[in-house]
Image (spheres, grey):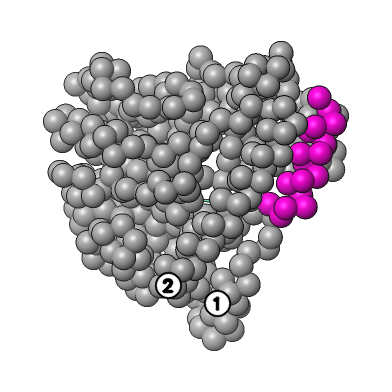
Amino acid sequence: GHPVFRDMPTTIFEHMSARARTSGAINLGQGFPESAGPREVLAAAAQAMLERSSQYPPMPGLPELRAAVADHYARHQALNLASEEVIVTSGATEALAASLLALVRPGDEVLMFAPLYDAYLPLVERAGGVAKVLRLAPPRWSLDRAALEAAIGPRTRFILLNNPLNPAGAVLREEELALLADLCVAHDLIAICDEVWEHMVFDGAAHRPLMAFPGMRDRTVKIGSAGKIFSVTGWKVGWMCAAPPLAVLLARAHQFLTFTTPPALQWACAQALAWSADWFDNQRAAYRASRDRLAAGLGAAGYAVLPGAGTWFLSIDLPASGIAMDDRTFCDRIVEEAGVAAIPVSAFYPAHPVTHLVRLCFCKSDAMLDEAVARLAASR
Ligand code: PMP
Ligand code: GLN
């Protein structure tokens, strides 16, 4: 094909979801809840759709939503954002694209961590950036000071961080975030923080935004997704938060990408962000129970499950489960033979992939999880 398309392959999510559809497999691949979405979230949107305008809302976002995001982060993460520092986007995906297009200049190095969310590399490269990818090692996926320092050079301008980390389910520890903040300050780096999984942290782990660390307030772009927070992945309502000098640039990129995001959905998200902490705690508890159910079922079927304290995903370790196949072979086989779609973790590596881990999505009904486990147990 045309050389320009080489760096934009079909994503693994689309590929595996298509295979799940054609083969009728249970789809534990692409990350989305089985339910249509929480009733109260859908009702807020339905009401807004009937009662409010569906014409272009303001370019940087509905004032109600910008204020609600700032207020939500004040209550949940002790951040002090002004609503002018919040730019609403069409999903975190647009926020990532807008941030990179707005800030990266040709030749700038962007330090990223593998496993790497699949949109990062094509976006960084199309923005003219040079990717510097640091590999984290399973099962702890921890950051190492010496490796980080060695990866930062005179042309490094950004770190692009996903925390909690998809697909690993890892949540960075306080010391690791402090280390990143130190390095950003010492080397004058801007941090682009993809925190879409901020509410999906379990086992007593708390989400700490990098923006809250000393020196980071004015050098961080914090990205969030209402699709994730409210279990409505198709809504594509997201945002990017940054101090005014950065926010102005982000908004300029946003105006040429999508300009706006459906106003009824923005309005519904503004309502929902203000709900009590109980709502978020209950949702988290339900997801944790689903994770534990899938992990226990897989464990009983002889699969070795990696520990993970965040996201909607868990991983199984193939060799530790006594399976002598790489992740892609295993995923190809189970989608056809067991009728379960999963994601090979190697898809999250531009080079030198980890090939022994398979990601499974657990935000499904008990019945669906049990059926998937029964199928995977029978296929052993
Ligand atoms: N970043 C990460 C790490 C994700 O996992 C996802 C979606 N799964 C996104 C960004 C995209 O979020 P959105 O659907 O809001 O565009
Ligand atoms: N982020 C979702 C996942 O990790 C997929 C989103 C997409 O399909 N682009 O499964």
Say few, some or many: other residues with alpha carbon within 10 Å of mark 1 (under 14 / 14 to 19 / 20 or more).
some
Compared across the picture, whether 123 is left or right of 340 comes to left
Residue 378 on the magenta segment: yes
Q: Please provide percent x and percent y for residue 149.
A: 23, 20
Q: Please provide percent x and percent y for residue 233.
A: 58, 55
Q: Earlier in the sequence, mark 1 or mark 2?
A: 1
* The residue stretch that appears in magenta: 364-380
Q: What kind of element bears circle 2?
A: loop
Q: Quadrant of residue 335?
A: top right
Give whichever of 293, 79 is nearer the camera.
Answer: 293
Q: Amino acid at mark 1?
A: Ala
- Can residue 11 be seen at all in this image of the molecule? no
Q: Look at mark 2 in the image and give the residue it sits on.
A: 276
Question: How many numbered marks are there?
Answer: 2
Q: Main secondary structure of the magenta part?
A: helix
Compared across the picture, whether 181 is left or right of 132 comes to left
Query: Which residue is depicted at the point 82% across and 36% down?
Result: 375
Compared across the picture, whether 366 is left or right of 253 comes to right
